[in-house]
Image: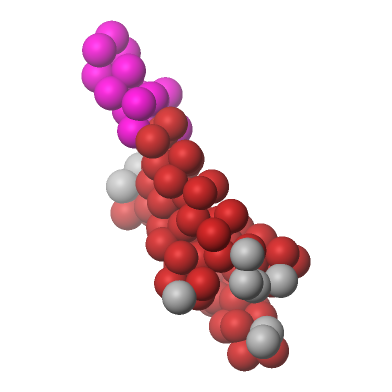
Amino acid sequence: MSWIYLVIAGLFEVAFTSCIGKVKETTGSEMYWWLTGFLISMSISMYLLIKATQILPIGTAYAVWTGIGAVGTVLAGILIFKEPATVWRVFFIVTLIGSIIGLKVVSH
């Protein structure tokens, strides 16, 4: 169950970083809705990370959480915010995914 909490926490990390991107693109009341989404997503992400670290080693959990967040945020940047998808960006995303999988395999 801890790994499920961790994956969901990572997805909420992607949500809160995506909200940051939307906050900087909007104004007025729409900006406050994205800011509210950021605060809610961040709170859920942190809560689930804490739940996951009650069982998983903190080093592994944090590395996987940030890895999921990093990969997801780069993909959101490419798909939502129209950032470039260069060969090197894709290469390093793939190596990061490999590292996350490796941490899962070697963790208890």
Residue 41 picture location, percent across and down: 40, 41
In front here: 84 or 65? 65
- Residue at the far right: name it: 59
Left or right of 50, for residue 82: left
- The residue range painted magenta reads 20-37
Percent of width and height locating residue 5: 46, 65
The residue depicted at 55 percent of the width and 76 percent of the height is: 97
**Depicted 51 relative to depicted 38: above or below:** below
Looking at this view, is 71 or 54 the one in front? 54
Q: In this rendering, is residue 83 above or below 88?
A: above
Can you give x and y, in whole percent of width and height, for residue 49 in the image? Answer: 55, 56
Tell which of 41 and 27 is nearer to you.
41
Asked if the stretch drawn in magenta spans residue 55, the answer is no
Judge whether residue 32 is colored magenta: yes
Front residue (pair 68, 87): 68
| Residue 68 in view here | no
How many numbered marks appear? 0
Which colour style is shown? secondary structure
Residue 74 at x, y percent in the picture: 48, 55
* Location of residue 13 with respect to 107 vertically, above or below: above
- Give the residue displayed 71% in from the left and 71% down from the top: 57
Instruction: List the single residue furthest toward the top.
Output: 28
Residue 79 shows in the view: yes
Q: Residue at x 25, y 19 (%)?
A: 30
Q: Image quarter for residue 102?
A: bottom right
* Up-down relation of residue 74 to residue 59 (above or below): above
- In the rendered structure, the answer to whether residue 107 lies left or right of residue 5 reads right
Q: Is residue 86 shown left or right of residue 34?
A: right
Q: Looking at the image, which residue sits at the far left? A: 30
Image quarter of the N terminus: bottom left
Q: Residue furthest bottom?
A: 105
